[in-house]
Amino acid sequence: MAGLEENGPEPTTSGADPRGDPFLHTRFAIPTRPVTFLRRERLVKHLDQAPRTPLTMVSGAAGAGKTLLVADWAAREDRSVAWLTNEATDQGCGMFWAYLLQALRASGVPLPDEVGFPADTNRVDQTLLTRLAAGLSDRDRPVIVVLDEYDRVTAPEIAEQLEFVLHHAGRGLRLILVTRTEPLLPLHRYRAVGDMTEIRAAELAFTPEEAAELLELHGLRVPVPAARALVERTRGWAAGLRLCALAAQQSPDPETYLKEFEVDRTTVADFLLAEVLKRQSPEAQDLLLRVSVLERFGPELANALTERTDADSILAGLHRENAFVEYLGHASYRLHPLFGEILHAHLRVRSPGLEPELHRRAAQWLRRSGSLAETLGHGAAAGDWEFTAGALVDDLAIGQLFTGLRSDDLAELFSRMSPEAASPATDLVRAARDLARSDLDHGLAHLRHAERSLAGNPAGKRRPAGDGPHGLAAARLSCALLESLAARLTGSPGRAESAAEAAGKLQEEVPAHLLDAHPELTALLLTHLGSTRLWAGRFEDARTALKTAAGCSGGASTALPREESLGQLALIDYLNGWLGRAERKALAALTETERFSLPEESGSGIELLVLAAVAVDRNELDRAQALLDAAADAHHAMRDPVTRAARAVATARLHLARGNTQAALEAAAPAVAADVASPWSEAHNALVTSAVHLAEGRPETAAELLREVPGEQVACVVGAARAELAAGRPVAALDLLDGVRPEGRTGPAATVRASLLRAQVADGAGDFATSRRLVAQALREARREQLRRPFLEAGPWIRPLLGTAPLHGLAAGWLAPGPPPCDARPGPEARTQAPVVEELSAREHDVLERLAQMMSTEEIAADLYVSVNTVKTHLKSVYRKLAVNRRHDAVHRARELRLL
C-alpha cells in the first residue's frame, strides 16, 4: 500500500478525539527517565528480543518499573516507536483506536485516509481494522507499538480487535504491552510457537546488588547485606525501594532508617502520608488533598478548589521535588496514580463532607472554561443535578442523548440523578432519557412538567435551566426537540409541525456558535418532522425535510439522524415502487453507521426493514428473513409508527411469498398506536388481506376490500384489478387500470404488475401478440430492478410465454436460467424449465468465485476474513439456490447460468 511507505506523505487527520476534544499529546510521549533511574542491562538485553517476536509483554505490579524500563529501551532504539499511554476513562473501542491511530501518526508512521477514523467512543468498524492491518503488513520494517498501562483496557472487544490487527499485520507490526495484569489475548498460542517475549514480575524485581546501585544513585551508600534485607521486605518492588530512598535521604542516619523501615509493618499508604505528605507545607498538603478528586489539573483549577492563589508556585515546587506530581505540559499536572488514590482516601477521612463541595467547585470552574464533558462529570459527582442538567441544556447538548456518540455515557451519568432533583432542566433530561427508550408515558409527563415550569418563568426572572445567559431560550428549544420526537413516536404530524415552527423561532434567540457546535439538534428536528409527514402519507413534504436532514453537515455528530433520514427516504422510494433507489438509499444509511462505528441499537433500523422488503420483491426470501432477524436482534431503541409499519410491510409480504397466509394476516396489522391513521399503512394491510382472500379462492371479497381503500393508491388499484380478473371480469379489470393516471413517481413494482395483468387479459382473449409485447415490456422494466415476485404471482399462464423467444432472452440470467434458445420455437423441455432462479447474494458470489479457483473452505475463509462456519453457511445457500449438492456441480451450474 503506497500510502504506508515510510517516506510517504503524511495524511491529514482530525485534531480531535471522538468526543470532539483535542488529543492529549502527552499520551504519545515516551516518558522521561529521572536522573536517579537505574538502567539494568539484563532487562535491556531481554527486551532487545522484542523486534523479533510479534508480541512482547512486560507485566508486573504497580510501581514495578515496567514503564521506565520500556521507555528507556524505546528512547535508545534506532527506529521510531509509537507510544500510547492508556487511561482508565477511555475504555471504549472507538476512543482506544482513535488514540492508537494518532500515536502511529505522531511517531511518523503515515496512514492512508481510507483507514478512516472512529467517531464513537464505544464502537469501531471492522473495515477500519482490516485496512489498518493490510496497510501495516506491506511495510518493509515493522512498526513498534508500545501500549503502556494496558491493564486499564478492560473491554474484551478491544482485545479481540487488537489480536485481529496483530495477526493480519504479520511482520509489519511488533506490539509491546506494559501491563499489571494478563491481557485478554490468546497468549498460549504465541507462547506455543515462540512468538512472544515476556518480562514478568519476578524478572522486574530488583536484586540486592541492583538495589544497592539504586540507593547509591540517591546518594545513599549502604552495604549489599543491608540492601538484601530491604529487598526481602519489599520483594524487590521498584517503587517501594525508590520511596525508601527518598525518605532515607531526609534522615541523618540513612542506613539505620532503612533498617527500621525494613522491619516496619506500615503500608505504603502510611509511608506516603507520613514521609511525603507531612513534609510539605500546610498549603501544599491542603492543595494535594483537594486536587485528588481531579484526573488532571492546572494552577487555576487548583486555585478554585483551594480558594487561594498560590497553586502555580506550589505545583512547580512539588514537581521539582519529585513529590509524585507529574507535569504534563501546557501548564497541566496530574498526581501519581498511587499517590492520588491514597490522598483521595485520606481526604475522605480527614475532611468528611468536603469532597462533594470540591467537585462542585471544579464543575463550576470547568463550566466557565467550556469543558462540558468534565463539567458534567464533576457536577454529577457533587450530586448537584440541577446544575449538571442545566449545563447540558444550556449548551444545547441535549441532542447528544440521542445521537449515539455519547448517548450511553450520558444515560449512565444521569441514571444516578436523584429523584428529588427538581428544575426544568432535570425534567427535560428525564424526558429525553425516557423518550430515547420510546417510553412515552413517562417521557411526556416529564416534558409537560418542564413546559409548565418554563411557561411560568417570564423573561427577567431566574433562569430555570442553567447559568447561561441564553438558558431560557435553550430550554425551550430543547422542549421543541423533545416535542417533535414525541410527535414522531405518537404519529402526530400536526404536533410535529407546531414543534418545528416553534424551534425555528427559538433558534433566532440562541447564539449562532451554539447552533454551529450542535448541528445534531437541527438534524434531529428535521428527521422527526419528516417521519411524521411520511406517516401521514405526505411523501413529497416528507422528502423535503428528510433530504435536508440527510444533507446536514457535522460529521459524526449528525450521523444518526442522517442514517435515519436516508432510511426513511428509502422507504418512500420502496412504497412508490422503486426498488433500486430504495436499496441504494438504505445501503447509504447503513454506511453512515458503519463509517462512524455507531452502536447497532442506535436509531430505528428502518434501512434493514427496507432492504428486507426489497429482497422479498426480488424473491430473495432467505436474505429477507436474515435482514428482518438482524433488525430484531439489534434491539433498536426507536420504535415509532413508521418503523412498526415498515416491519409489517416486509414481514407480511415475506409470509405471503412463502404461502403462510395466516401469518401474513397477523403481521400486516400490528398494534401501532398513532394519533392519525396512515394511508399507506392501511392500504398495505388491505393489500395483504386481499391477497389472502385471493389465495383462498374469494376474489369477490378481495376486490370489494380494495375498492373501499380511500384515495387513488396505484398499488391498491392494481390489486383490485387483479381480484376482478380472478373473479372472471377482465373488462372491469381493464377499466380499473385505465382509470389510473400514475404520476412519474410510480415505479416498476406497480407498473410491472399492471402490465402483466393487461398481458393476462390479452392472453385470455387470444391476442397473443399483445400479450407477448406487454410481457416483454414488463421484463424490461423488471430487469433493471431485479423484480421477480410479480412474475411468480402472475400464475401458470405466463410460464409458457417465458420459454419463448425473445422473451426467454429478456428473462435469462436474472429470472430464467440458461442462455436463450437458438431457434425461435424451443422444444417442450425449454418451455417447461423452471423460469426463476433465486439470485445469489454478493457474499455468496464471492464464495462461488473462490470455489471455481479450487480453494478449500479454510482458504476461502482466510481470503474473505470470515469464519469457516460462515463459509459453510454460504455454501449451503449456494447449493440450494443452484439445485446442486457438490462443489463441482455448483461451479458447472454457475457457468451454465453465466454467473461466472
Image (cartoon, helix red, strand yellow):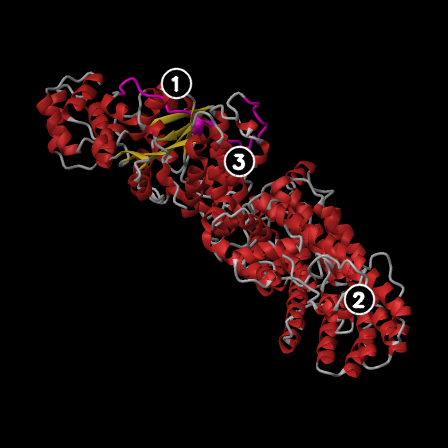
Which of disc 2 and disc 3 is earlier in sequence?
3
Q: Amino acid at mark 1?
A: Asp
Q: Which sits in the foreground, 144 or 832?
A: 832
Q: Secondary structure at mark 1?
A: loop
For marks 3 and 1, give the one nearer the viewer: 1
User: Which residue has dot 2 on it?
Assistant: 753
Q: Is residue 389 magenta?
A: no
Q: Amino acid at mark 3?
A: Asp
Residue 524, position as x, y percentages in the image: 67, 50
Q: Main secondary structure of the magenta part?
A: loop
User: Horizontal placement of 501 versus 261: left or right?
Assistant: right
Hey, which quadrant is residue 496 in on the image? bottom right
**How many residues crowd around disc 3 within 10 Å: few (fewer than 14), some, or many (20 or more)?**
many
Q: Residue 575 vs residue 284: left or right?
A: right
Q: Is residue 792 above or below residue 158?
A: below
Percent coordinates x, y for residue 414 in the rendering: 50, 51
Q: Secondary structure at mark 3?
A: loop
Q: Position of residue 638 (x, y in %)?
A: 60, 58
The disc label shown at residue 17, or none: 3
Q: CA distance from mark 2 to mark 1?
A: 72 Å
What is the magenta range? 8-37
Q: Residue at x 75, y 47 (%)?
A: 505
The residue indicated by pointer 1 is 78
User: What SS does tag 2 mark?
Assistant: helix
